Amino acid sequence: MLTAAETLRQVDRMLRERAFHEHPLWKGLIEGTFNRAQVQDFIKQHGIIPLHNHNYHGPLYIVCPDHKWRARIAEVVYEEGTGRLYANGVPHNELYLQLAEELGLSRDEMWNTEYCAEAVAIRCYYSQVCSRNFLEGVSAHMLAGEAQGPGWFTTIANKLKEKFGITDKGAAFFVIHDKADEDHSSIGKELLDQFAKTEADLKMVLRTVKTTLEMSKLFDDGLYRRIRALA
């Protein structure tokens, strides 16, 4: 019979097999092989996540059936919206806009980005899965999504500073998400113990993580195709 512990082991295995930092999109950011125009396009398209995160974490708060855990999700929403837990009072979308500005992008450009099909798809997916079922939403957004980033974002920040002269202020988005996303993903793992009551629940978690990783790859593949065209 599938257990919570075995489910988490399988989740960890899927994350290792789909290691995002080995995708050429993220590898290029980590190694600093992209030019400014390529990084600008990445920042614009990837903005579908940080600039619209209220559409993902917000529904998780609403559909959470337990008041104690709802308070914990509220902390995540609060941090994204205010930055008062990790970012010295700067909301996470503002951190992202500061990074964009230091790379030569205006706020109007960022808020009015014409998103590619893969970006629209990932937005629709997260909006839907986070609104439908709490366990399913946590599995997608936290167990699969936010569990991938910690440990690599600071490396990306340092490379942007080295190659493009980004300041600490501009790099703060990635540095802060190394800590914040680690905290978010651990919340997801704790919630699994409480809300996955049956083997069917655990199987749903595994299916959701698998689908989310596939959607993430679709998103990364689309962005990488765009970036290669700007080389």
Image (spheres, helix red, strand yellow):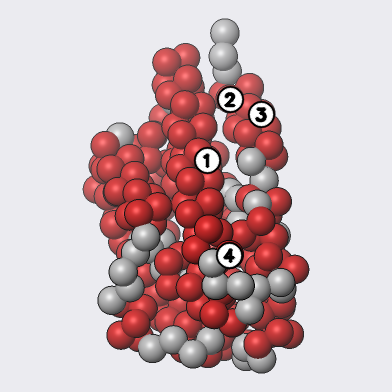
In three-dimensional space, the C-alpha distance between marks 3 and 4, rounded to whole angstroms, equals 35 Å
Q: Amino acid at mark 3?
A: Arg
**Pointer 4: what residue?**
228
Q: Is residue 166 left or right of residue 57?
A: right
Q: Amino acid at mark 1?
A: Leu
At horizontal 46% and vertical 43% (from top left) the residue drawn is 215
Q: Residue 20 appears at what percent x and percent y? A: 63, 50
**Pointer 1: what residue?**
213
**Pointer 2: what residue?**
7
Circle nearer the N terminus (3, 4): 3
In three-dimensional space, the C-alpha distance between marks 2 and 1, rounded to whole angstroms, equals 16 Å
Q: Is residue 8 left or right of residue 46?
A: right
Give the numbered dot on residue 81.
Answer: none
In three-dimensional space, the C-alpha distance between marks 4 and 1, rounded to whole angstroms, equals 22 Å
Q: Amino acid at mark 2?
A: Thr
**Pointer 3: what residue?**
9
Q: Quadrant of the N terminus?
A: top right
